[in-house]
Image (cartoon, rainbow, N blue to C red):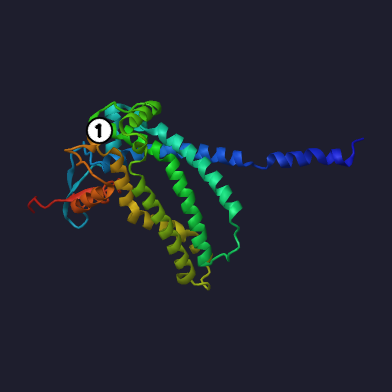
Amino acid sequence: MESPENLHGPAVGVAQDATPTTVDVDTAVFLLGAGVTTLTHPLLYVKLLIQVGHEPLPPTVGTTMFGRRVLYLPGFLSYAQHIVKVDGKRGLLRGLSPRIVSSAISTVVRSKVKQQIDVLFKNGDQQNSLRKVVKETSHEMIIQCLSRVATHPFHVMSVRCMAQFVGREVKYGGMLSCMVKIFKEEGVAGFYVGLIPHVLGEVLFLWCCNLLAHFINTYAVDESFSQASAVRSYTKFVMGIAVSVLTYPFMLVADLMVVNNCGLAAGLPPLSPVFSSWLHCWNHLSNKGHLFRGSSFFFRRVPLTSIED
């Protein structure tokens, strides 16, 4: 007859095995991230081509609901069909491999840095205090910045692989050849072109989103309102959408600097001037009214001023 310890032993073992480890969680996050990255890659591919100003399809004349005539630029579906027509369905996955590697590295870096931050800093602030929000946002900023520094070289490789579609170049192939090519031509600095505006945009997004959500939840949402908790749970999400629109120019400038003067048609005249710095790029886009180029996939239109009524 088995002892009570033996009877309880298997149950304890099952409970211990059922507890997810950090490695299990990181693996699950990576697999989920890789899946999402693959599914959304065609969207980002089309977005990148629009950002660099590549418009291979002619606009069409249409009218708005108010009767105003406008030029409609091709949307995502038309653009994606054009890519498939030129490169086949696999062409929509150009530049995907570096993004998947970037996702894996980001998962590991974020996990390790968060563990260290949790050990060094204890959470003793009140749940809704401004001090707690500032503290948590500071930690998020550290995690985001370190993750960006670690993954930016792969972002550079991915963007340049996608930008080759414009001039039909074959300069950047697999990741190893990309690394060798960039290092030979630009050195280590070549892997970090566009890093500054990218980091600035992400840091600005974090602070604006978290602080706005805190102030709205604290001062605008009435405690007597029956759905106050539900409203608070969506505030940060809504603020994220709004703030992402304001910080979009930083992402645009970062991507343009990645392809700037790298030997690809997408980053050279006549499609694009050669920029001396990211501020030069920003000023150029601002003067042209293109700071939000590529921010929309649909209803891309240009007002017609030369067509007679």
Residue 284 falls left or right of residue 114:
left
- Amino acid at circle 1: Leu
Could you tell me which secondary element the residue under label 1 belongs to? loop
Identified at 90% across, 39% down, the residue is 3
**Quarter occupied by residue 161:** top left
Q: Which residue is mark 1?
A: 264
Residue farthest left in this picture: 308
Residue 53 at what x, y percent from top left? 23, 41
Q: Report the front residue among 53 and 197.
A: 197
Task: Using the rendered view, name the quadrant where residue 36 is placed.
Answer: top left
Residue 54 x/y as whole percent: 23, 38
Task: Name the residue rendered at 43%, 59% in the picture.
Answer: 207
Work out whether residue 109 or residue 42 is closer to the camera in this orientation and state it. Answer: 109
Q: Residue shown at 56%/51% (left/top)?
A: 117
- Give the image location of residue 109, x and y in percent: 51, 42
Image coords of residue 255 (percent x, y): 31, 43
Please identify the quadrant where the N terminus is shown.
Answer: top right
**Badge 1 density bin: few <14, some 14–19, many ≥20, Cα 10 Å:** many
Q: Is residue 277 above or below residue 92?
A: below
Whether residue 75 can be seen here: no
Residue 72 in view (yes/no) = yes
Q: How many marks?
A: 1
